[in-house]
Amino acid sequence: MSRAAIISIAILLITRSGALASISCATVIEEVAPCTSFLQGGSKQPSVACCNGIKKLSGEAGTHQNRTAICQCLKEGLASIGNYDPKRVPQVPKDCGLSATLPPIDKNTDCSNISFMM
């Protein structure tokens, strides 16, 4: 394969991957980090900081691609916090007063085939 073809493929992959979602995992993790205590059962209600983060993510979830990216980032981030209750994930937006719906998210969640509204 010629060098020009390799460069063209690399450019296509880089620009395509950037267009898939406008939200980064770093942003998702930063916004939901304050929710850790609630998700692990350490508090009865999500904190104000948790709710503020979920509200910000809700504003970013306008496209299917962003919702899929948010789900995948949540899945990866939650896997790193240790034990948590996936059934508490759908409670966060409800307890924060949002009409958004999230499914229980765990290591087996298929984010590419998930429907939720934020």
Image: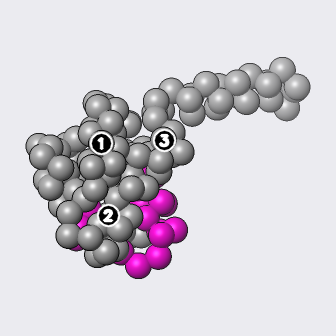
Which residue is the site of mark 3?
27
Q: Is residue 74 left or right of residue 94?
A: right
The magenta stretch spans which residues? 73-89
Name the residue located 13 percent from the left edge and 53 percent from the top edge. 94
Q: Amino acid at mark 2?
A: Ile
Q: Position of residue 24 (x, y in %)?
A: 51, 39
Q: Amino acid at mark 1?
A: Asn
**In this orientation, does residue 72 appear?**
no
Nearer to the camera, 55 or 2: 55
Name the residue located 42 percent from the left edge and 69 percent from the top edge. 107
Which residue is the site of mark 1?
52
Reply yes or no: does residue 86 show up in magenta: yes
Q: Position of residue 26 (x, y in %)?
A: 53, 45
- 1 or 3: mark nearer the eye: 1
Q: Amino acid at mark 3?
A: Thr
117 up-or-down from 95: above or below: above
Residue 86's label in the rendered image is: none
Nearer to the camera, 36 or 110: 36
Task: Determine crowd level at label 3: few under 14, some 14-19, many 20+ residues with C-alpha closer than 10 A.
Answer: some
> In the orientation shown, which residue stands out farthest toward the right?
3
* Quarter containing the N terminus: top right
Q: CA distance from mark 1 to mark 3?
A: 13 Å
Q: CA distance from mark 2 to mark 1?
A: 20 Å
Name the residue located 65 percent from the left edge and 30 percent from the top edge. 14
Circle 2 SS class: loop
**In this orientation, does residue 62 appear?**
yes
Which residue is the site of mark 2?
105
- Pointers 3 and 2 in contact (CB under 8 A)? no
